[in-house]
Amino acid sequence: AAGAAALVHSVDISAAAIDSAKRNMARNAGRAAVRACTHQVSVGDAMTVMSQMIEAGRLFDMVIVDPPSFASKQDQIDGALRAYGKLTELAVRLLNSGGMLVQASCSARVTSEQFMESVGDAAYRSGVQLDGISHTTHAIDHPDTFPQGAYLKAIFARVLPLR
């Protein structure tokens, strides 16, 4: 909202998290851009809500996907990668052409390479390409001195039709 978005739609399965998002918008209402932004909310499973939005023909210029950890154990990695792929498939269908996908993972067991491949493959299966991919990890003040410490990773990419 602070970046001059006309609309922000927050989705979370936790009503408490949605209440926190509402409070955050209210706290920042002193900023003209935030006041001008419409804030819609949905309490529910993100995959279900995103599917409903697709059915309703909703489109956005940016979709941010920041799920909880999907793999706290080694045997959960394959399921986590499938979930990231499904979230990507849904997210890209909610984007206007040229829209921005921001997708994060906080699963320590999933490597950055696995996450990037899962998101990229799902985008390709959906008939889009990820352009100008930027990949981030922890900030310098959050050192990851052991393998499971490198749990945070994110992708920023413009979504375009396949050429």
Image (cartoon, grey):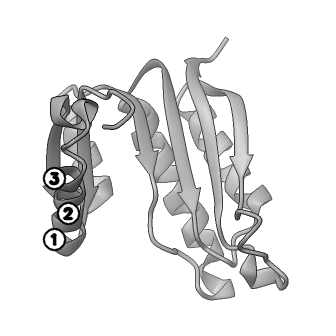
Residue 48, image quadrant: bottom left
- Name the foreground residue: 151 vs 51: 151
Disc sitting over residue 7 in the figure:
none
Are the residues at dot 3 and dot 1 in contact (C-beta closer than 8 Å)?
Answer: no
- Pointer 1 residue: 15
Q: Please determine whether, in this image, residue 18 is positioned above or below residue 35.
A: below
Residue assigned mark 2: 18
Residue at the spot x=61%, y=39% of the render?
Answer: 156
Give the left or right position of residue 36, taking residue 119 as reference.
left
**Residue mark closest to the camera, 3 vs 1:** 3
SS for callout 3: helix
What residue type is disc 2 on?
A: Ile
Residue 93 placement (x, y as % from top left): 39, 31
Relative to 3, does residue 136 appear above or below in the rendering? below
Q: Residue at x 63, y 53 (%)?
A: 154
Q: Which residue is mark 3?
A: 26
Specify few, some or many for label 1: CA neighbours under 10 Å numbering under 14, 14-19, or 20 or more: some
Label 2, secondary structure: give it: helix
Mark 1: secondary structure: helix
User: What amino acid type is highlighted by mark number 3?
Assistant: Ala
- Distance of mark 3 from mark 1, alpha carbons? 17 Å
Circles 2 and 1, Cβ within 8 Å, touching? The answer is yes
Residue at 51% from the left image edge and 75% from the top image edge: 69
Q: Residue at x 28, y 45 (%)?
A: 50
Quadrant occupied by the C terminus:
top right
Which amino acid type is shown beneath numbered disc 1? Ala
How far across and down, in percent of the image, does residue 34 sit?
A: 24, 37
- State the CA–CA distance, disc 2 to disc 1: 5 Å
Q: Position of residue 129 (x, y in %)?
A: 64, 26
Q: Residues within 10 Å of mark 2 (few under 14, many from 20)?
A: some
